[in-house]
Amino acid sequence: DALDPGPGDTHRRRIRSMADTEHRFKYVFIPADESIPVEEREGIGVGSAGGDILVDLLRPHFVGGGSLELATESGSTETFALVHPASTNGYRGVYLYTDECGKLRSLPENPRALELAQRCGIDVRHPFHGDAFVGAVKTSPPPMRNVSFTEHELDPGAPWMLIAPAENAVYAETFREFMSAVEGKATREELEHRRESVTEETVGRRSRRTSEGEEIPPHGLRLRDGVEAYHALLAATVGASCVRVENSCAAGGVGVIANKGVERGEVIWSEAPLVSIQSPANVDEALCCGWCHRAVGDIDAYLSLACGAIDGDAARGNGTDRASPPWIAVRRSLAALEEAEGTPPIVRCKRWRNRGCKEVYCGDECARDHALAGHDVLCCSDAPFSSDGDVREEAAGGGGGDEAERAAAAGAGALREFFSGNDNLHMIARVVGSMASTVAAGQSWDDATLKFRAFVGIPWWETSGSTGAEKRLAKRAMRLMTESAHAAELNVAREADAAAEAGDEDAFRLAVEVRNVLHRFPDVLSRLGLDGVGHLLGVCDMNQLSMTIDGPMRNVCRKLLRVDEYEGADAAKPTLDVLLPIALRAQVMRDAEDAAAGKPRWGGEDRYEGDEEEDEEEDGMEGEIRLDETADAEDLFDASRRLFGGFKGQALFSLLCLVNHSCEPSTAARFSSWKGRAMVRLEALRDIECGEELTMSYIDESETLEERTSALASYGFACRCAKCVGEGADRSNDVSGPDVDDNSDVD
């Protein structure tokens, strides 16, 4: 199956005997045509890898035809649990396999399959369409594998069928308890403890070993198989033929080496993020696409939001009348305002009316891509629960919605509330979504993990030293992601049925793809286990870059400054007269935000009081410009980054995150403008020789040696660059400290 080892294990498979690699099992064919008898068939599994191979084995039987051939030409198998694996049944689950597109293709109903499900005590609300199969899997001892299910087991008196109604009733009650705990917001910890043993029983997966015989955890994130080849191709993949990736230190780190000389100011390469998020705290401050992070909306929304005339919900669009206050409207004909033109209109998440989801997009394509990366797992408002612990109406499918929608909304709400403002937890959800999308597309587990195995990291709890707290956070995040994904999958499956009923082929195909990704979410988390999730959290924590991108108003203020410089103050005055009052309102808001956060007043005393030159020379005052009614275009530009804001988030970059640190860096990362998808470009700060390793600074290199050492402590190394060594020698002539790595990459 898609979680099997990749091609790199082919040689190891070949040297095993057939007795070790082949197992046969029975399964049963139930034709939709009742005049055709059921038939017992045999399947053959090859290899020791776990998984249910019937999903792929039966796909050719469900190859499409007819009017919907494009949607079903590759075949798609849907699994339906007749009884889930549990200790009471020896961890043997029985599943019904049907044509996922059967209803859409108008295949005949299968009454025998429906009757079988009902005998198992399952409330089936929709009939099965087309032929069906019944098979069994066993999950313990791991790995999961197919086991025989015979024709005789279809008899109503078969032992498994006699206990199935009771087992399904227990399973349904457990799920209802979970939803009650989520919606009640009171007993989730107790329920999680009750479910913990069940979760741990299903986490088991096969282990692999290194060539030296060392056992590798099931997630395999520390496996280096394929990483060297991936690094070799990485530079070419992002169009950076002028560099190569090489081993950098004995600890296993890598570095990026120049293949040719680079001149100061030259852009060495540009790349898009591997995974990225907009910080939750920034969502109500900057209107940006939730997937590519491009600025969306118009200048009226930017200005109204920046000065507090409206809140984020109004800026995103919820029916507010823009023709009247509090909206601010400006004339587009004013000088410099054309610089803000060209941003696409806002496309809201399709669930925003039901759930209050804040995600916005620059177009339908980004909305689709985000959905295919598991957005439904977190699709909810930031405050899903009311003060009395109930799920808010807008976060629960409108309060009177379908049960599946309410369950999905409550699951996403519980997860989002738990994540709160923790960027690292939001990043791990995006990472797991990326992996689930890869395996749902039919690629191997090794393929899904390769991009993240290419980073060298340590467990999250080792970066902070607070093992217990971080482990509890990670464990609970895994549980909530799993449960949210389960609920979201059921809801999307319902939407797929509705689309099929309406004959909406595009909506059906998308829903099926999204459902397949959500179906893989729990599988990925189970395979990762706590150790794997902790490793990925550590990779994110140590490698992600804080990504800040100026918004459209920065360009407007820059253009206004040029108008002032080249055409005179009179030409800039009409625009300045409009923007300055708005900027002053924004300044009051930023000051209040700083005060609430305990930060010192920006710029200290008003720079326009007393001697201007003396104020500018105060320590820490340079660049902290304050505005008043006499401010000019230059002042407005200097203050624009603080007052009008822009995108803020976190990102992992496949190649950039392999560049090592130095307090005397040779390069610097520059982020793209707001006009397109988020990108980073690496620029040379000085001339770089062929064969020289590129470096960048992970911290503020202008700080003192002690401050820099403290800032780098969480990365797990002490800097040994010439600047640090020199400053240390000047003080003690003895570079001392803990036995730690050199400046190895923190990927």
Image: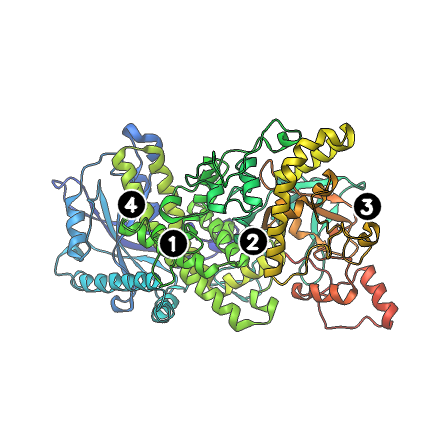
As drawn, the label of residue 485 is 1
Q: CA distance from mark 2 to mark 1?
A: 22 Å
Question: Is 186 drawn above or below residue 225 in the view shown?
Answer: below
**Pick the front one: 309 or 130:** 309
Q: At 75% across and 48% down in the image, what residue appears?
A: 667
State if disc 1 and disc 3 touch (CB < 8 Å): no
Q: CA distance from mark 4 to mark 1?
A: 14 Å
The numbered mark, 2 or 1, whose residue comes first in the sequence reads: 2
Name the quadrant of the C terminus.
Answer: bottom right
State if disc 1 and disc 4 touch (CB < 8 Å): no
Question: Is 708 drawn above or below residue 25 in the view shown?
Answer: below
Q: Secondary structure at mark 4?
A: helix
Q: Position of residue 246 (x, y in %)?
A: 70, 51
The quarter holding residue 383 reads bottom left
Q: What amino acid is at disc 3?
A: Arg
Q: At 41% across and 53% down in the image, what residue appears?
A: 521
The quarter holding residue 640 reads top right
Report whether residue 10 is seen.
no
Q: Secondary structure at mark 1?
A: helix
The numbered mark, 4 or 1, whose residue comes first in the sequence reads: 1
> Circle 2 sits on which residue?
452
Q: What amino acid is at disc 4?
A: Arg
Q: Position of residue 620 (x, y in %)?
A: 76, 57
The numbered mark, 3 or 1, whose residue comes first in the sequence reads: 1
**Pick the front one: 211 or 638:** 638
Q: CA distance from mark 3 to mark 4?
A: 58 Å
Query: Left or right: where does residue 264 sit relative to residue 133?
Result: right
> Circle 3 sits on which residue?
686
As drawn, the label of residue 494 is 4
State if disc 4 and disc 3 touch (CB < 8 Å): no
